[in-house]
Amino acid sequence: MSKLRAVKGMNDWLPADARRHRVLEDTFRRVAGIYGYGEVRTPLVEPTPLFVRSIGEVTDIVEKEMYTFEDKGGKTLTLRPEGTASCVRAYLQHNVQASGPVTKWFYSGPMYRRERPAKGRYRQFHQVGCELYGDAGPFGDAELIDLAHRFLTELGIEGPRVLLNSLGSGDTRQRYRDALLAFLKPRAAELSEDSQRRLERNPLRVLDSKAPQDQEVSADAPSILEFLSQDDQTHFDDLRRTLDQLKTPYEVQPRLVRGLDYYTRTLFELKGGSADLGSQDTLCGGGRYDGMVEQLGGPPTPAIGFAMGVERLLLSMAEGDPSAGCDAFLVVTPAQRQLAVGVLSQLRSAGLRVDSDIRGGSLKSQFRRADKSGAPFALVLGDDEASAGTLQVKDLREGTQTAVAVSATASHVLENLKAP
Ligand code: HAM
């Protein structure tokens, strides 16, 4: 029988990874919270047309990466490849605009894209993201970019860089599209097969291509910033001024485009950290998508958001387990193993995260396991302690040891954990 393995590109999270993920999520919740964002949770599965209509038919995601299947009732469903379309669907379905002009949501969860797996690119991956409805910017845009930048800084990611562009709105895109097409068409033969195929329907995607021949051709392409209307230009200038005021560093990248079709005006990405992620180095992608709510059947509603790849963030963060598994490790002499059952239960009820080697073994080997566990304290329960109703509390960092009544041990350890 062939070995059972996880689906290619989909990963298990063992406790150390899950713990780092949890710390990251907690940090995201806190940072999003201080900007006034509330959490939403939407289903992992949505009707396929939601993604086709919002993300765009001529995109990698819709053309070849969606996990789409028919359910038993004959409906075509798709595992969500991203969170933005689902948020808009939920926003409309629950008539959220009726409860106030501005809505700020954040989310965290798994997404699915059938991409070629590589370091930092998976078929099941996780995103944390924010979406803001009802504000046309540019202050909301600046605040959102500032939030993303602050989050990366709080995670300890070195030198986060914000790359910024504007795609304009209304007929700006169309005028730029025409100019780009006029530039690319005579060079079509030099482009990759994918780009040649997309040229007529979506020439902007050529700028986003990772193929070296496409990058060479597009290096001299006209810049969209030369095509912005007066309103777009004012929006972009005001956004830049506000980012300067917030002291959020950014770099204007006129050739920045993104793989989803729904963007208008503000477009941004964040990179950073020391991990070598190759072409998977975009930690965060986002932008304004003022047309989507209306396109999915709602009233005209400006919107902007971003999403970050959790796996990429974890690869980019400093190594190390941000919180050790346990506060203390109980070391027990063979005669006290029965008593230890009750002591462990008492300590856990008092809120202490405590582990022990339930197989017993020599004191030396138990101390070795205590060290390996990463717990800062070892608690020793020997015959003397058993008759005195105490535990020896050994600070494994300092090497000091004190006898403490069992009933007071949890608070003693927790108090000392807080000490610097
Ligand atoms: P996206 O650029 O497709 O945008 O994805 C955002 C981030 O998710 C990427 O920068 C990357 O860090 C991560 N990511 C994407 N695909 C993978 C993958 N296969 N494996 C690992 N990480 C991945 C969106 O998803 C938009 N919904 C962002 C947005 C929100 N725009 C407006 N609101």
Image (cartoon, rainbow, N blue to C red):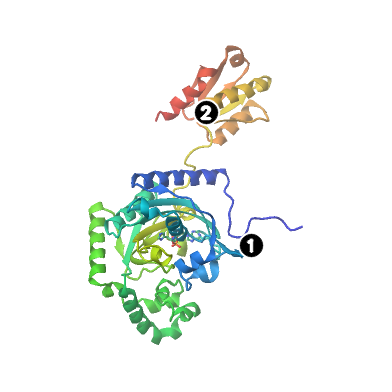
In front here: 108 or 160? 108
Which residue sits at x=39%, y=79%? 217
Picture coordinates of residue 112, whole percent (x, y): 54, 60
Q: Residue furthest right?
A: 1
Q: Residues within 10 Å of mark 1 (few under 14, many from 20)?
A: few
Find residue 145 and report its image quarter.
bottom left
Q: What is the quadrant of residue 78 in the picture?
A: bottom right
* The N terminus: image quadrant: bottom right
- Specify the farthest residue to the top: 388
Q: Residue at x 66, y 27 (%)?
A: 362
Ligand 1's quadrant? bottom left
| Count of marks placed on residues | 2
**Residue 84 sits above or below residue 321 on the image:** below
Secondary structure found at label 2: loop
Ligand 1 contact, mark 2 (Cβ < 8 Å): no
- Mark 2 vs mark 1: which is more N-terminal? 1
Q: Which residue is mark 2?
A: 352
- Which residue in the protein does label 1 denote? 73
Res. 223 in view: no
**x, y (%) of residue 202?**
42, 76
Q: Quadrant of the C terminus?
A: top left
Amino acid at circle 1: Gly
Disc 2 packing (10 Å; few <14; some 14–19; many ≥20): some
